[in-house]
Image: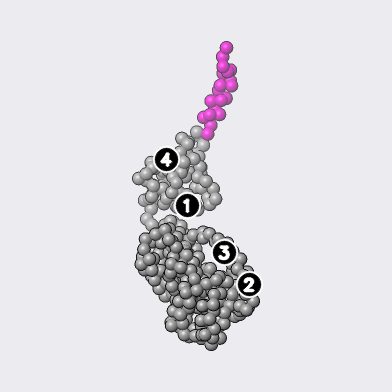
Amino acid sequence: MAEGSPRRATARSAHVRGPARTHARESPPPSAGARACPAADGACAPKKSYPVLFRSKREAFAFIHTQREALALTRLCALYRVTRAGYYAWARRRPSAHAEQDRKLLSIVARAFHAHAGVYGSPRLVRALRADGIAISRRRVMRLMRLAGLRARAARIYHANPGVHHFFNQHPNRIRRLAVQRTNRVWVGDITYIPVAGRWRFLAVVMDQYSRRILAWTLSGRRNTQLTRAVLNAAIRRRGVGPRLIFHSDRGSEYSGSLFRDRLRQLGVQQSSARHGPGENAHMESFFHSLKAELLHGATFETDDALRRALRGYFQYYNGHRLHSSLGYRAPIDYESAVA
């Protein structure tokens, strides 16, 4: 018995041949948020293409061009729904004036990015470039960083619960509603810990809240009132005691101990303490987050001297060069000079 009648076979053949006479339209490349369509043989798009979001065929061709040595052109074009003829036409086309400008700007953006140790995102990079006389928009910087694979360093810092300290009514939070209008009005201090060759080292820091300038820092193997008193004395030697100076910290025993409180009383400095945990010493919490994300995250230190050198370099950079959004994208030392 025949598998099918001649009429049905003819109709089937006509149906198969029909699309061959129609010119297939070139499908657009994957848009933002869409995955690249897999090739017919089940191949997947190269890993490096994610999270690249091709907004135009030009971007798809540019990416394919970077992958020519790793994969065949026919396969790449199939993966990203473009034609080989389109790619060759793009490759023969002379770069536009805008593309040439992008190429030059990309090297400038990359140099600025690496000059700041990879910690600047697009907002700070734009400010830094404009300060150097380069007129560029944030959107363009974001696009160039995306094409070059430049991403600012950041870390998700785990904040352990420090426990509940006893409340000392004689040291309330004196800065909660205080509008600070000058330097040497409020200093803030805190302590963090850093591993060195399997042991903890404790870093105590004092900051001027108004200008965000780091006034002093001390590193020790013990967390006690001697550490906090030593960093306080170092800040006093650098700045002196301003009128009605307030020193704000958390309620740790290193700041509530008699050795530290007596030194504040001797200097005529008012003591202020956070009452409700995270957030009431936000300036220091923000600084330590930056320190860990930009310097300590992923780094190892085998000796105290190596850690001290790294910290010394970072504090010089932080005070003299790092742009702060809260200061109108100026460094603390420049900000103090401007408002003096």
**Measuring 41% from the left and 48% from the top, which residue is drawn there?**
64
Label 4 or label 1, whichever comes before in sequence order: 1
Label 3 or label 2, whichever comes before in sequence order: 3
Distance between the Cα atoms at labels 3 and 2?
14 Å
Q: Nearer the viewer, residue 63 or 81?
A: 63
Q: Which residue is mark 2?
A: 167
For residue 52, which numbered disc appears in the image?
1
How would you rate the neighbour count of disc 3 (Cα within 10 Å): few for under 14, some for 14-19, many for 20 or more? few
Q: Which residue is mark 3?
A: 162
Q: Nearer the viewer, mark 3 or mark 2?
A: 2
**Residue 329 in magenta?**
no
Q: Which residues are magenta?
A: 1-19
How would you rate the neighbour count of disc 4 (Cα within 10 Å): few for under 14, some for 14-19, many for 20 or more? some
Q: Measured from the top left, where is residue 80 in percent x and y?
A: 47, 45
Q: Measured from the top left, where is residue 36 in percent x and y?
A: 50, 45
Q: Nearer the viewer, mark 2 or mark 1?
A: 2
**Measuring 62% from the left and 75% from the top, which residue is drawn there?**
168
Q: Which of the image's four quarters has the N terminus?
A: top right
Q: Nearer the viewer, mark 2 or mark 4?
A: 2
**Image height check: is 32 above or below 241?**
above
- Helix, strand or loop status at disc 4: helix
Q: Nearer the viewer, mark 4 or mark 1?
A: 1
Distance between the Cα atoms at labels 2 and 1?
52 Å
Q: Left or right? Give the position of 260 relative to 277.
A: left
- Helix, strand or loop status at disc 2: loop
For residue 75, which numbered disc appears in the image?
4
**Amino acid bearing label 1:** Val
**Measuring 55% from the left and 23% from the top, which residue is drawn there?**
10
Label 4 or label 3, whichever comes before in sequence order: 4
- Helix, strand or loop status at disc 3: loop
Q: Measured from the top left, where is residue 148 in percent x and y?
A: 42, 57
Q: Measured from the top left, where is residue 290 in percent x and y?
A: 48, 66
